[in-house]
């Protein structure tokens, strides 16, 4: 195996690990740790595919900084009213395109499916879609500079409470 | 088919009680489709969604799918999305551009006004088959709806002799409608859709009920966006079918008036205040006007987030809410970003609206199991007239006064 191949594989594993730790953090409900996956200035959005494909900017959730991500966590924890639920993310097909531009950013894509379980109902699919991400290195860690969660399931089953 | 009124009687207390069968009875729901959604003006589209000739939008009037088009002369049309031949719902794209519509099943062809223009094998093949000689394509077009546009907003009606929109809305509702739709070109920012497992009337009631807003919505209350201690009003048209909740931004402080609002959080602070950075853009003092237009539209103006919320009933116990967020074509980039950030308050993940979609699901689950129980609607008294405060359920009572008339209940 050539050195170049193993470097790209290692990079993909590193990005995959970032996605998996991200998903696990959300599934465990550790929302306080969620903003730490992003750089200080960032764009996080959960956007219906019909908007994304037409170039329409409206997102269901839009955060333009770590502060805005934390404001979302505050809302989840202390202002929003919703019934209890569990989410479960499945992330697959992680792809890294390019080893980075002059700023060292990486572009990555991955598919996701998110199941939602409410109190007395069978588990249902909350969303299927894909992540389109830009990541930057910060010390030893990777951080999302942009993360767009583009969801195919444009009709939301009632509410979208937790981040994707 | 059994009529609800034969077996079910509205409680003698009148509009201060709502019987729970009204939210789940299938026969009543069928009658609502005929008596409510197939009469009057239903919102179907913004002109900005179909700006060019041949543009179309797949929309809904009640539970029926309709297609709204703009023809070569710029005129708008609406017709039912159901082939005149065998009933196929032929238009599947939410938006598009076309010179004609062809049903995929037997390829009957319609023009942009819904007229039948072509029937394959109409004269048969090699002397075989074909439609009867007297078959008149002019008699087999798509079912057409009346259409009206006002300041970029398109309404349609199955009732071809429906009154003019201005009369339908009445002067007070028209004034508030024109406050947002003042003739400026609109820009669509995007869509949000959700399916809520609750009767459609619960959605309409939610936006006619300012009582809950001061209590349920911690976010609104804490940041003073909508609160019972602020100068507010509930205005209606004479029939009671349309309404506006009007209010003004207040301060994040405790007072005598906020004592009962256990959810007022004076300690709540945004880490990134750009999330709520409203600028005044409409004349007058009001910073929020939520307008409900019978039977299927909520016009949302909360600070700088503007949206049409179109109600699509999906049976007695579910509805879809299709949100079209918009701004104005002359908004600068900063204004557009402001609208996009404030949209975090609304939609299925909204800091405010999520409370409502959750509350409606919980309402339906309580209501479903007790069809003979009654809801109590006495906040602010038993009357149905305009109020200059929001400690009232008056617009719900007025809504049900009109509803009972229309439904003969």
Image (cartoon, rainbow, N blue to C red):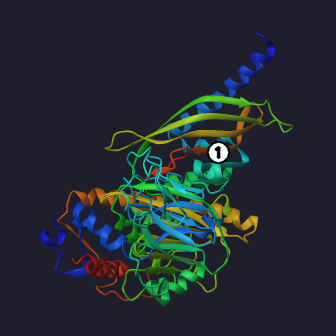
* Residue B225 in view, yes or no: no
Task: Specify the farthest residue to the top.
Answer: A1
Quadrant housing the C terminus of chain A: top right
Residue in the picture at 36% in, 86% down: B239
> Looking at the image, which residue sits at the far right?
A102
Picture quadrant of residue B329: bottom right
Q: Position of residue B296 (x, y in %)?
A: 42, 70
Disc 1: which residue = A148
Tell me which residue sits at (39%, 89%) in the image.
Answer: B238
Q: Nearer the viewer, residue B293 or B214?
A: B293
Question: Dividing the image into 4 quarters, which one contains the N terminus of chain A?
Answer: top right
Q: Chain of mark 1?
A: A
Residue at 72 percent across and 70 percent down: it is: B331
Residue B324 seen in render: yes
Instruction: Tell me where residue B284 appears, x and y as whole percent.
Output: 61, 86
Q: Percent x, y for residue A139?
A: 78, 33
Q: Please report the residue visible at 27 percent of the width from the left and 58 percent of the height from the top.
A: B366
Q: Image height check: is B10 above or below A76?
A: below
Q: Judge the density around disc 1: few (<14), some (14-19), many (≥20) Cα neighbours within 10 Å.
A: many
Camera-side residue of B140 and B185: B140
Total marks placed: 1
Q: Secondary structure at mark 1?
A: strand
Task: Give the residue furthest to the left.
Answer: B7
Please determine whether, in this image, residue B37 is positioned above or below residue B233: above
In the image: residue A41, left or right of residue B19: right
Return the x and y of residue B82 as percentages of the image width and height. Answer: 41, 57
Q: Can you tell which quarter of the image residue B283 is in?
A: bottom right
Above or below, comparing residue A130 to residue B387 in the picture: above
């Amino acid at each position: 195996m050539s050195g170049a191949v193993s470097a790209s594989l290692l990079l993909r594993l590193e990005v995959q690990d970032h996605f998996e730790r991200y998903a696990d953090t959300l599934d465990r409900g550790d929302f306080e740790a969620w903003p730490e996956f992003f750089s200080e200035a960032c764009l996080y959005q959960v956007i219906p595919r019909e908007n994304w494909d037409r170039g329409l900017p409206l997102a269901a959730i839009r955060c333009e900084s770590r502060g805005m991500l934390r404001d979302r966590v505050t809302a989840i924890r202390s202002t929003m009213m919703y019934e209890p639920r569990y989410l479960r993310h499945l992330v697959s097909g992680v792809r890294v395109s390019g080893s980075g531009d002059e700023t060292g950013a990486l572009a990555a894509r991955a598919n996701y499916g998110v199941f939602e379980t409410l109190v007395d109902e069978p588990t249902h699919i909350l969303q299927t879609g894909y992540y389109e991400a830009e990541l930057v290195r910060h010390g030893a860690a990777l951080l999302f500079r942009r993360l767009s969660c583009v969801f195919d399931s444009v009709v939301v089953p009632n509410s979208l409470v937790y981040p994707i | 088919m059994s009529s609800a009124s034969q077996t079910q009687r509205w409680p003698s207390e009148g509009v201060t009680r709502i019987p729970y069968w009204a939210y789940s009875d299938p026969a009543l729901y069928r009658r609502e489709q005929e008596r409510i959604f197939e009469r009057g003006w239903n919102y179907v589209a913004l002109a900005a969604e179909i700006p060019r000739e041949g543009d179309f939008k797949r929309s809904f009037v009640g539970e029926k799918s309709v297609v709204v088009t703009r023809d070569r002369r710029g005129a708008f049309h609406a017709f039912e999305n159901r082939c005149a031949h065998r009933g196929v719902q032929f238009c599947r794209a939410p938006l598009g551009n076309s010179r004609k519509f062809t049903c995929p099943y037997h390829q009957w062809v319609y023009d942009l006004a819904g007229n039948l223009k072509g029937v394959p094998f109409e004269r048969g093949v090699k002397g075989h088959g074909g439609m009867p000689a007297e078959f008149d394509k002019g008699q087999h077009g798509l079912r057409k709806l009346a259409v009206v546009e006002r300041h970029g907003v398109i309404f349609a009606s199955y009732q071809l002799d429906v009154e003019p929109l201005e009369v339908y809305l009445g002067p007070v509702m028209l004034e508030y409608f024109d406050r947002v739709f003042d003739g400026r070109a609109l820009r669509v920012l995007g869509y949000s859709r959700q399916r809520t497992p609750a009767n459609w009337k619960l959605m309409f009631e939610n936006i006619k009920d300012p009582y809950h807003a001061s209590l349920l919505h911690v976010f609104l209350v804490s940041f003073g966006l909508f609160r019972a201690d602020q100068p507010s009003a509930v205005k209606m048209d004479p029939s009671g079918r349309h309404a506006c909740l009007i209010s003004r931004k207040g301060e994040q402080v405790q007072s005598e008036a906020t004592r009962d609002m256990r959810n007022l959080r004076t300690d709540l602070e945004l880490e990134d205040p750009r999330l709520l950075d409203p600028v005044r853009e409409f004349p007058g003092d009001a910073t929020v006007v939520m307008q409900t237009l019978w039977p299927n539209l909520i016009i949302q103006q909360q600070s700088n987030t503007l949206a049409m919320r179109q109600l699509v009933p999906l049976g007695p116990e579910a509805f879809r809410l299709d949100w079209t967020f918009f701004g104005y074509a002359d908004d600068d980039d900063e204004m557009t970003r402001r609208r996009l950030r404030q949209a975090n308050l609304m939609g299925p993940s909204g800091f405010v609206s999520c409370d409502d979609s959750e509350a409606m699901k919980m309402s339906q689950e309580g209501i479903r199991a007790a069809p003979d129980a009654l809801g109590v609607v006495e906040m602010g008294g038993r009357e149905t007239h305009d109020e200059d405060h929001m400690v009232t359920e008056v617009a719900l009572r007025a809504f049900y006064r009109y509803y009972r008339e229309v439904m003969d209940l």
